[in-house]
């Protein structure tokens, strides 16, 4: 046999490689005892968490799970790309309430896999905003809740004889007393999705909402303008927030507090663990928590990390088994123990709160209250594009490029047009 | 049997417009060509088709003709991105070419330390744009950044580099200029070193000043190199993404939204691939148009002169 590569051999090998590549997905699909998942990660503990969940699940069911891990932003981009390509590469996706409306036609409905009594144990606010409002289909199932409370420097507050703010006015008063000498009384994010989340909280607190009864934009109401004006004034007028906050997202927001530069912030459940860890915080033992501030109402967003079934999956039954396992009480308890992630199961949350002690018990109770009163922006057709518009409108007001009224009015006009074209009013 | 087979092959050879060696070449190259077609031409064609559909993951994707293009061309956000792109491209290319030429002339001289300077010039283009973006984000931070700290040292007021719309655009231009000017220097330096010395020596003998030698001899001789530099930078500025995304994400309020950043936001935030594809093709069309002007206008002028 000759050692040289003939033309015929070269072409045959090329054809074999091509055929093998093309056939691989089908070959992989043929094994019903193995599923694939694209899962969320973040921080050093998350990979170990998924490793344990997958090992336990495989030991229990015999179903293997091949999975990839990505952090939130690249994960979102990848799910968007795979959905657009109608890919069946992954059977299961980690997802989130934030952009769920984009996937209503790509994630398989989970309604038939969960009984009413099973769904009743999840926080209603979580399940409500994971449903397609048009069809009632459940696009994903919540894995843990995301809501914010106030974190403040208890040592500094005590030294200056201050109490954590309860209202908007108090937030400004306390902030003014704390700001100076390179320190700021408060930090809020001012860019992209975090800015929209912050505006959203203030909008609801001022008595407004995103849309009216007819689903037409209503965020430019008097309440909306009041909310955005207050938000802008925290940075530009009262100057109790670092000036660069206009470009801050969640990471910068958290770091300003954990580094000790800023004395109060509103942050997610993960901050509790981060701020308690000396490796990630300079303020360990110097902070405490309080409820989110209020104006006319005490409302802020309550959203959830969730699990979804790819509509293109050829292995739906074992994939759903895995999804069910990831939202089981055991998995949620493990999540809470490792990351203090707040459970999406109402009954488990009650258990966790009852067993907690000291500051953690107070914090969990505050989170519970936020979630019980929480809301989310509407999941109407085209609203994801409206969000992109809102990022720009809010940033324009925060950076004094336009007045809050002008920014919101222009955004409302464009938002209605976007939603009409997307079929929100059909 | 052998002579018959030989005759058939010969017959085929005679009918084919290509010599046998060419056929064999194409045949061997065909797997690579197929892969190229699959990973380059197919996505380009597919995204072009996508730009004529309402492609937003909503299930149906109806054909809407040039709807995505007209939406964007008359849309506020696109026009803001277009204005930013024009300012970014014109200002950064102008500074990079002028400064690049000036530094190249300086480095081309026989001054002490020029060898070290030439080596150092290689550093900025070697750094990944993402790293440049992150570094400049911190340099321009008002609270912790080096630039404002230096201003404070001289009792000058802080500048809101990344949070004021005008300064934010200046900041991303500075980052781009920092990274790409050395590339221009290297290109121009290579050009300067390959220039014929006779015209320069003759001009010196005739009493021309250094400025006159540069303006009337060096610059005209360097024209082909400058054209290539301009072409590279025009193509590059229309593709700039990483630096802007890491410094400002297009903010505040779209003040640094370039066409690429806007297209990315449309695709991955708004999940609107139809509009994102349309914006990408408008950007491609514009860069081709500018390149056409760059090469076409001098060609037309030369043709007229010839007539």
Image (cartoon, coloured by chain):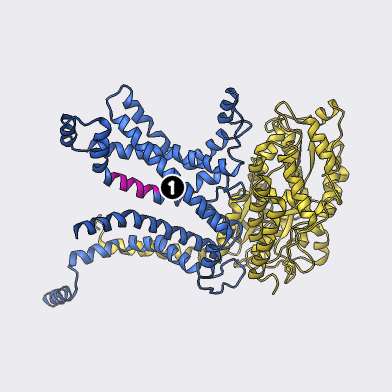
Q: Categorize mark 1 by other alpha carbons within 10 Å: few (<14), some (14-19), many (20+).
A: few
Q: Quadrant of residue B32?
A: bottom left
User: Does the image show residue A304?
Assistant: yes
In this view, A283 is above or below A56 = above
Chain A in the picture: what colour? yellow
Task: Give the overall secondary structure of the magenta segment.
Answer: helix
**Position of residue A126 in the picture relative to residue B244 (left or right):** right
The chain in blue: B
Which residue reaches farthest left? Answer: B3
User: Residue B78: horizontal and vertical position, in percent?
Assistant: 54, 58
Quadrant holding the N terminus of chain A: bottom left
In this view, B11 is above or below B136 = below
The residue located at (50%, 67%) in the rendering is B50
In this view, A352 is above or below B45 = above
**Position of residue A178 in the picture relative to residue B260 (left or right):** right
From which residue to which does the magenta span run?
B225-233
User: Residue B178: horizontal and vertical position, in percent?
Assistant: 45, 37
Q: Quadrant of residue A419?
A: bottom right
The residue located at (71%, 30%) in the rendering is A261
The residue located at (43%, 58%) in the rendering is B286
Residue B228 falls within the magenta-colored stretch: yes
User: Which residue does the numbered mark 1 point to in the structure image?
Assistant: B90
Q: What kind of element bears circle 1?
A: helix
Quadrant holding the C terminus of chain A: bottom right
User: Residue B217: horizontal and vertical position, in percent?
Assistant: 23, 39
User: Residue A252: horizontal and vertical position, in percent?
Assistant: 66, 39
Residue B113 falls within the magenta-colored stretch: no
The residue located at (31%, 40%) in the rendering is B187
The front one of B298 and B206 is B206
The front one of B70 and A64 is B70
């Amino acid at each position: 046999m000759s050692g040289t590569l003939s033309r015929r051999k070269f072409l045959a090998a090329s054809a074999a490689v091509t055929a093998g590549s093309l056939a691989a997905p089908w070959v992989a699909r043929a094994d019903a005892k193995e599923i694939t998942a694209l899962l969320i990660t973040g921080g050093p503990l998350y990979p170990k968490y998924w490793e344990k969940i997958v090992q336990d699940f495989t030991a229990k069911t015999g179903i293997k799970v091949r999975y990839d891990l990505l952090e939130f932003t690249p994960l979102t981009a990848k799910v968007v790309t795979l959905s657009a390509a109608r890919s069946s590469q992954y059977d299961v996706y980690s997802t989130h309430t934030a952009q769920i409306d984009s996937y209503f036609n790509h994630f398989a409905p989970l309604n038939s896999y969960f009984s009413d009594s099973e769904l009743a144990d999840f926080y209603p606010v979580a399940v409500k905003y994971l449903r397609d409002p048009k069809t009632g289909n459940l696009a994903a199932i919540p894995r843990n809740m995301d809501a914010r409370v106030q974190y403040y420097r208890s040592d500094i507050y005590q030294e200056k004889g201050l109490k954590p703010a309860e209202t908007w006015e108090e937030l400004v008063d306390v902030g003014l007393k704390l700001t100076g000498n390179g320190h700021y009384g408060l930090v809020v994010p001012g860019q992209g999705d975090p800015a929209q989340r912050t505006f959203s909280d203030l909008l609801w607190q001022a008595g407004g909402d995103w849309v009216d009864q007819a689903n037409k934009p209503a965020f430019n109401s008097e309440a909306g303008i009041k909310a955005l004006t207050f938000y802008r004034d925290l940075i530009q007028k009262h100057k109790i927030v670092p000036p660069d906050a206009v470009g801050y997202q969640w990471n910068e927001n958290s770091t300003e507090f954990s580094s000790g530069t800023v004395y109060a912030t509103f942050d997610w459940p993960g901050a509790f663990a981060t701020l308690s860890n000396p490796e990630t915080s300079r303020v360990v033992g110097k902070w405490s928590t309080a409820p989110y501030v209020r104006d006319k109402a005490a409302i802020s967003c309550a959203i959830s990390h969730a699990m979804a079934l790819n509509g293109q999956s050829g292995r739906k039954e074992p994939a759903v088994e895995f999804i069910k396992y990831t939202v089981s009480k055991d998995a949620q308890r493990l999540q809470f123990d490792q990351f203090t992630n707040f459970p999406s199961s109402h009954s488990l949350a009650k258990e966790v709160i009852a067993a907690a002690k000291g500051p953690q018990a107070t914090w969990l109770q505050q989170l519970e209250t936020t979630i019980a009163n929480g809301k989310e922006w509407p999941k109407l057709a085209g609203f994801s594009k409206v969000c992109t518009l809102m990022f720009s409108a809010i940033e324009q007001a925060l950076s004094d490029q336009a007045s809050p009224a002008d920014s919101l009015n222009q955004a409302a006009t464009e938002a209605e047009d976007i939603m009409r074209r997307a079929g929100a009013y059909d | 049997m052998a002579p018959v087979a030989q005759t058939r092959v010969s017959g085929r050879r005679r009918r084919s417009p290509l010599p046998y060696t060419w056929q064999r070449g194409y045949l061997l190259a065909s797997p690579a060509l197929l892969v190229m077609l699959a990973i380059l031409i197919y996505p380009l064609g597919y995204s072009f088709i996508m730009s004529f559909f309402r492609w937003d993951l909503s299930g149906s994707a109806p054909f809407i003709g040039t709807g995505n293009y007209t939406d964007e061309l008359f849309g506020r956000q696109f026009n803001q991105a277009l204005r930013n792109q024009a300012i970014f491209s014109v200002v950064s290319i102008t500074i990079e070419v002028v400064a690049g030429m000036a530094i190249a002339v300086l480095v081309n001289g026989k001054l002490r330390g020029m060898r070290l300077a030439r080596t150092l010039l290689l550093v900025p283009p070697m750094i990944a744009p993402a790293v440049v973006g992150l570094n400049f984000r911190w340099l321009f931070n008002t609270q912790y950044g080096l630039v404002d700290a230096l201003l404070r040292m001289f009792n000058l007021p802080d500048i809101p580099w990344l949070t004021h719309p005008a300064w934010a655009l200046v900041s991303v231009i500075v980052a781009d200029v920092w990274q790409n000017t050395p590339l221009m220097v290297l290109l121009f330096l290579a050009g300067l070193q390959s220039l014929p010395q006779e015209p320069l020596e003759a001009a010196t003998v005739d009493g021309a000043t250094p400025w006159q030698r540069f303006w009337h001899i060096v610059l005209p001789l360097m024209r082909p190199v400058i054209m290539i530099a301009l072409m590279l930078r025009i193509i590059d500025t229309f593709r700039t993404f990483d630096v802007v995304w890491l410094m400002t994400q297009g903010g505040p309020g779209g003040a640094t939204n370039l066409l690429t950043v806007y297209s990315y936001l449309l695709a991955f935030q708004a999940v609107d691939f139809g509009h994102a594809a349309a914006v990408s093709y408008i950007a491609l069309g514009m860069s081709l148009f500018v390149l056409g002007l760059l090469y076409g206008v001098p060609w037309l002028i030369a043709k007229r002169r010839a007539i």
